[in-house]
Each structure stands twice: as C-alpha cells, then as structure tokens.
Amino acid sequence: MKNITIDLSKDMGKIKPMHAVNNGPVCSRSDMTSGNFAAYKAALFPYARNHDASINYGYGGSHVVDVNCIFSNFDADENDPAAYDFFLTDLLVKNTYDAGTKVFYRLGASIEHWQKKYNTFPPKDFAKWARICEHIIMHYTEGWADGHHYDMEYWEIWNEPDGRLDDDPHKPCWGGTKAQFFEFFTISAKYLKSRFPHLKIGGPAMAFRYYDWLDEFLDHISSNNVPLDFYSWHVYNTYPEITEELAQMIRAKLDKAGYVNAESIIDEWNYVHDWGDGWNETINRINNMHGAAYVASVMTVSQYQPIDMLMYYDARPTTMNGLFNLYGYKIQKSYYDFIYFAKLYELGTCVDCTRDDSVYAVAAKDGNGKFGAMITCYKNEAEFTDTLTVEIKDATTKNVRVYRLDDENDAADAGTFELVDGKFEISIKNYTILYVESV
C-alpha cells in the first residue's frame, strides 16, 4: 500500500513554469497544417528556449537563431541592418509566439559534436559580439531593422562553456579557455544589462560537469560586479533526487555569492540512462512510459525546490524529443505530462503534498474550490503493482475524476471516484501517471 496526502489548506506559493521546453513548433506551411503546430499549441508551453535550433532543417538549419547565423560576417558593421539576416529566425519566433509560447533566447552558437569546430570559438572581439547581440535584442524587442516588439524578457549568454576541460581538443560548445569565458561573460553581461536594464540577462547554461567551475565562475563575476538575473544549468540523469540535491546546492552558492535574486533555471534536462554504450536504451526510454514517468517526477519535485523554471530538452524534432515522434510528429507519452502540468499552472496556487516511496505528487488549486493533482509512480529499473490511497484534505467536493497515463492508456479517463473520509484508492504500477481533478 502506498499513500499520498494532498492538503488544500496549505498554500505553497505559485505554481512555477516547470513545463517549458527547448525550441518551437514545426510548421513549414502558411496554413499551419504541416508539422506539429496544433499539438504544440495545445500543450500551452509557457516558454521555449531556442538553443540548437540551427541543427534542425525544419526551422531553417544553419540560418536561424545563432549569432553566427544571423550576423555571418563578423567583420561587417554591426550597426548596419544589411549585415543581419533575420528572415528565418523571424518565422520561427513568430510561429512560437503564435502557439502561445514566449521565446527564451539563447545568444551564442549551437553545439558542435563534429571533429572540426566552426562557430564555438571565442569571438575575436568580445565587446563587438555584445554589440551585435544588442542589435538582435533591438530587432526583437524594439523594432530595429523592420523588427518586432515581442515580450521577450530572457536573454541567455552562451551554452555549456564548462562542457570540457581547457586542454580537451573536442570541446563542443566553447573552444576557448575558462578564463577567456569568464572575461567574455563579464563584458557581455555588463554591456547588455546596461543597455536593457528591464530585460533579464543571464546564463551560462552550465553543463555541470565540474563543480569547481561554478565556484570560480561565481567568484569571478561577483568580484567584478557582473549583473546576473538568472543562472541557467543542465542536468541529465535517472533519479529526480539528484535534481533536488543540485538545486539546493546551486541556490546556496548563488546566495553566498550575493546573487540572492538571481533565478535558478534548468534549461536542459531529460532522462539519460547512459551517454555511452547504453545510449540506445536511453533513447528508447525517453520515448516510452519509463521516460515519461521520470519527466513527471522531476517536474513534481522541482516545484517544491528552489528552481524557478524547467525547460525540457527537447521539443525540437530529435532523438531526445519525448513529446513528438521524430518522423511524423505523432504525440508521445511525455507530451501528456506537459498537458497535466499546464492544468496545474492554470489553477495557479501550489498546495502541500506528501510523497511515498517511488510515488510523487504535485497539486494546485484556484480561488473557487477547484483543484488538480499530478501523481507519478516512478522507480528506476523496477517493476511492481500496488494500491495507492490518495487523501485530499479540505476538499469541498465529494468526488474526483481520474485520468491515467501508462503503457496502455494515453491520459484516458479512468472514471469518477468518491471520496470516503476524504480518501480514494486506485491500483497503480510503476511508470504510471495519474491526473486527479475536482468534479
């Protein structure tokens, strides 16, 4: 027997955007009938980070998002609109906003796993790179160069500069040294924040391979009075408790460095069983209930941790996309996690939940007696069936409706359950996700 208690009388603050993603919809036709636009829009993703968009042909390939794609000739005049090519990036950004999702813009380059690197080396002039980024921000928020006035507040400087050690010749994201990156970030962040004080400037989308890298980075930027509106980082694993531990550690380090108001954002995460020989198993699990249950469990625990936003990697058509099938964009299991969490996000106020061994719960309510809860059974590398007792304290309704996501059901209606002494029972197995709502 497993037990979960949802206490509607105990408010835990706002539901946070734990259901954001990387990258936007795919829609190559003007009528939006091609690709996954309709399903993407229905998921109500609050934000989409646009890292690695240039690796996807459906978005425009090497002509979108990256600074080197938009401003391809670094020796050109950064003040000249003709030096910029915004066309395909404009389409991708528009499609994302049309789907109801705000863009979280990553300034920098996409990852380069290939043997020869092209765009991941340090810019030859850090100050000019910052001015180029200034004009990209101007285009999307101030209308510069026949641009737009989007509500686009998050601007992230680079991606995974800590991905490899300085002497590793195959560094996929930052081809320079650690010291060079610290200087680069300092110059860029100071300039962009001075130019756009109303926007959120942050980064560096840390891969989190080396703990001392973070300490040195924070020490450098704090000692140089570098503004930091948000600190972004990545985590790939199979245990949600690891994410909890890292979140607490990072929050403590940010606070100690003086960045008590900086948001802590995980803007890449997914189920990864093994990056090496077990990669095929990783991909299989991302696309089935094993991965979906992991995703739901991380979204659940993160709501109650010092994490301000989660951004799933990836909604871009790729093998790491557990939302849409790579070929044809058919909806996959993890997609429903985001549908469920969007319901909680709409309700607004998080409430207290207990959790049992391998069972996680997150719940929310509105101001009119309506409530919902996502309950996930996840234990990595295990198989079991059990009975779950759900207690809902302070409920004003006598009945709840339950939806089930498992190997056999895609968010199927599992029926209405009567609350007897505030409780109901339901059979569950590992890798099952339930959504419970007031009737």
Image (cartoon, rainbow, N blue to C red):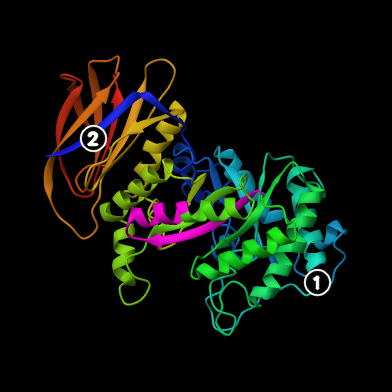
Q: How dense is the environment of label 1, judged by Cα within 10 Å: few (below 14), some, or many (20 and up)?
A: few
- Which residue occupies the foreground of this view, 215 or 91? 215
- Residue where numbered disc 2 is placed: 4
Where residue 258 appears, as percent x and y from the top left, is: 64, 51
Q: Is residue 345 placed above or below 213 in the rendered structure? A: above
Q: How dense is the environment of label 2, judged by Cα within 10 Å: few (below 14), some, or many (20 and up)?
A: some
Q: Is residue 313 visible?
A: no
Q: Which residue type carries mark 2?
A: Ile
Is residue 154 rendered to the left or right of residue 417?
right
Where is the N terminus found, in terms of image quarters?
A: top left
Dot 2 or dot 1: first in sequence order is 2
Q: Which residue type carries mark 1?
A: Asp
Q: Residue at x 11, y 46 (%)?
A: 385
Is residue 270 rendered to the left or right of residue 80?
left
Where residue 273 appears, as percent x and y from the top left, is: 32, 66
Q: Is residue 245 magenta?
A: yes
Where residue 47 appears, as percent x and y from the top left, is: 55, 44
Helix, strand, or loop for circle 2? strand
Q: Is residue 253 magenta?
A: no
Q: Is residue 29 placed above or below 217 in the rendered structure? A: above
Helix, strand, or loop for circle 1? loop
- Residue where numbered disc 1 is placed: 125
- Which residue occupies the foreground of this view, 270 or 55? 270
Q: Residue at x 28, y 67 (%)?
A: 281
Region of the chain picked out in magenta, as a range:
229-248
Q: Residue at x 40, y 42 (%)?
A: 338
Q: Quadrant of residue 222?
A: bottom right
Where is the C terminus found, in terms of image quarters?
A: top left
Is residue 12 rendered to the left or right of residue 127?
left
Question: How many marks are shown on the rendered structure?
Answer: 2
Q: CA distance from mark 2 to mark 1?
A: 56 Å
